[in-house]
Image (cartoon, rainbow, N blue to C red):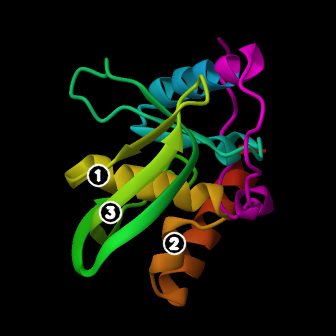
Amino acid sequence: MTIKNILVFPDPRLREIAKEVTIFDDDLRQLSEDLLETMYEFNGIGLASTQIGVAKRILVLDVSEEKNEPRVFINPTVKILDEKEKGGFDEGCLSIPGFYEEVFRPTNVEISFQDLKGINQKISPSGLLGVVVQHEIDHLDGKLMVDYISPTKRQRIRSKLLKLKKNKT
């Protein structure tokens, strides 16, 4: 397993739309292991492949307290079952380090995906799991949590992260 570099907003590669996975092989398993190791290394609870510059529809997450329940979602899609039910959560993102914003997302959803063997699965997640899955699917679709906040806040975050990047080089 290898710890990967995480792209940081406003890197344009974060806006790339991931392509469907069609080959379920050792390379895909290795990618999922690398994603999990990277997520754990940076104390995250979810990570999409686009955040490490890989445009494939794969995400990983682990919302357990002990960080011992890793989950892998291949080609995930979200179906909103009730548009009216929305919950607000303070969300953070490994690609937007140090910032947390309240994002309102549907609470009644169904997630369809494939596992590492290509077997179709469905879940109806709630609470934190539901939020994290939707957040990571957004990444695969080129969307970021800053897209849910005002343009002024988004520009402020962008400027601060660019300044931090400049100071590191």
- The CA distance from mark 2 to mark 1 is 25 Å
- Name the residue: 50% across, 23% down: 41
Compared to 160, does 86 lie above or below? below
Q: In which quarter of the image is the N terminus?
A: top right
**Closer-to-camera residue (61/10):** 61
Q: Is residue 86 left or right of residue 1?
A: left
Q: Give the range drawn in magenta.
A: 1-30
Residue under label 2, please give it. 146
The mark tally for this picture is 3
Task: From the top left corner, tell me how far across and down residue 17 is, in percent.
Answer: 74, 60
- Give the residue number, with chain letter if any, for mark 1: 124
Residue type, numbered disc 3: Val
Q: Mark 3 or mark 2: which is in front? A: 3
Q: Distance between the residues labelled 1 and 3?
A: 6 Å
The one of 33 and 148 positioned closer to us in this rendering:
33
Q: Which mark is residue 109?
A: 3
> Residue at position x 62%, y 70% from top?
158
* Left or right of 40, for residue 22: right
Whichever of callouts 1 and 3 sits on the residue coming sooner in the sequence is 3
The reply, left or right, for residue 112 in relation to residue 162 is left
Q: Nearer the viewer, residue 163 or 9?
A: 9
The quarter of the rendered structure image containing the C terminus is: top right
